[in-house]
């Protein structure tokens, strides 16, 4: 069931267009990630949803009711920021209880809710701790408990893990996803990190320069990027120019790398994307690339290679245990054209 509707939101600051015709819906219990580079409008959009900024045009609806004239404190939305903004003069209990006290809940309800939230984030023994003595990960969990305690209609998280080191971020984003889904908490999660978005989100809204490039599940966006920008943002850099023609009754894209069969209604000049994870060395495909292996780097669970194919450097990823030739040797890459190749119109 749709619970939040963003309708044609636009916003400018002086001569800068921050948002342009933004529209999407959020269903109850769904986690939606606003993903994109810095300056694309993610945080501005979050501020408008929270009521901290007023849009130039458009509206926001909660359960079909406009929020245009509803002040932030009456929207009953929760906010969690990158710096956590814990109150340094209050202990853990008082921080988590803060929103409940502002809502004038009675002490019995507050005690039970604080206990429940601390247990949920795995810090049930921290009630009397000074927040200034907590680690970054512990502070993040307490900030989440505080945000969830008043049972907000919508929880908005603005780069909540941005100040933490990468290893801690990778662990905590999994915990966040588990806790939010366990609570069936409707949430909007702002990030510039695609791995965070893929881990936590049911759907992703990928933004660029104030507009939406693509909306879809993590799987949909990764397997079928809608634009060249989306592909490049997801670090798919194997993009080469080509022209689509028919040859022997079959559509093919003619490129400096050779000719490839393609299923597309696009005509004329195109850019061909070759997915970095869709090559193999099994020798079973009729579509192959031949080149010289110029680099191979170990990345833990995978190995990234760069091959020079017809003087064009291409990057591919393989399982880390795969046996590769030595740099400088010839390599033959088998492609699955049904999933490895995609074309975009070229201006």
Image (cartoon, grey):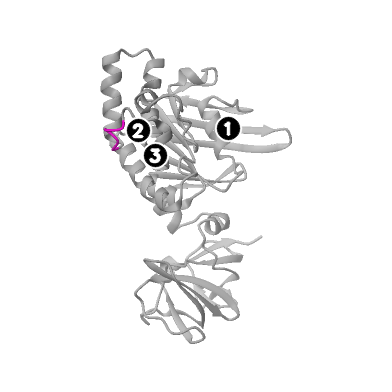
Quarter of the image where the N terminus is located: top left
State the residue in front, 119 or 228. Answer: 119
Number of other residues with Cα within 10 Å of mark 2, as a class: few under 14, some 14 to 19, many 20 or more: some
State the residue in front, 329 or 277. Answer: 329
For the record, the magenta segment spans 122-126
Name the residue carrying label 2. 185
Q: Residue at x 36, y 41 (%)?
A: 176
Q: Mark 1 vs mark 2: which is more N-terminal? A: 1
**Is residue 250 visible from the viewing direction of this image?**
no
Q: CA distance from mark 1 to mark 2?
A: 24 Å
Name the residue carrying label 3. 31
State the residue in front, 196 or 124. Answer: 124
Label number found at residue 9: 1
Contact? badges 3 and 2 (CB < 8 Å): yes
Horizontal side, residue 284 vs residue 316: left or right: left
Mark 3 residue element: strand
């Amino acid at each position: 069931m749709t619970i939040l509707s963003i309708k044609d939101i636009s916003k400018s600051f002086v001569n800068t267009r921050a948002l342009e015709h933004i529209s999407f819906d959020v269903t109850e219990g769904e986690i939606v990630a606003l993903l994109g580079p810095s300056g694309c409008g993610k945080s501005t959009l979050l501020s408008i949803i929270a009521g901290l900024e007023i849009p130039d045009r458009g509206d926001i609806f909660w359960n079909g009711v406009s929020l245009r004239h509803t002040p932030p404190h009456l929207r009953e939305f929760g906010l969690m920021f990158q710096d956590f903004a814990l109150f340094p003069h209050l202990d853990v209990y008082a921080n988590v209880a803060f929103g409940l006290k502002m809502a004038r809940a009675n002490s019995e309800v507050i005690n039970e809710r604080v206990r429940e939230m601390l247990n949920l984030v795995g810090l049930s023994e921290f009630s009397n701790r000074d927040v200034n003595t907590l680690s970054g990960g512990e502070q993040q969990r307490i900030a989440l408990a505080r945000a969830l305690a008043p049972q907000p209609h919508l929880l908005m998280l603005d780069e909540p893990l941005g100040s933490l080191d990468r290893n801690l971020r990778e662990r905590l984003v999994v915990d966040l996803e588990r806790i939010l889904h366990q609570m069936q908490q409707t949430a909007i999660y702002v990030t510039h990190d695609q791995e965070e978005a893929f881990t936590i989100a049911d759907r992703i809204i990928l933004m660029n320069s104030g507009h939406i490039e693509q909306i879809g599940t993590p799987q949909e966006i990764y397997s079928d990027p809608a634009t060249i920008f989306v592909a490049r943002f997801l670090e798919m850099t194997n993009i080469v120019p080509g022209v689509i023609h028919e040859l022997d009754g079959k559509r093919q894209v003619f490129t400096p790398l050779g000719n490839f069969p393609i299923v597309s209604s696009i005509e004329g000049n195109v850019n061909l994307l070759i997915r970095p994870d869709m090559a193999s060395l099994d020798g079973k495909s009729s579509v192959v690339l031949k080149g010289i292996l110029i680099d191979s780097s170990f990345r833990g669970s995978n190995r990234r290679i760069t091959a020079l194919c017809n003087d064009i450097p291409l990057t591919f990823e393989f399982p880390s245990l795969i046996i590769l030739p030595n740099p400088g040797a010839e390599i033959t890459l088998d492609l699955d054209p049904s999933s490895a190749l995609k074309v975009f119109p070229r201006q």
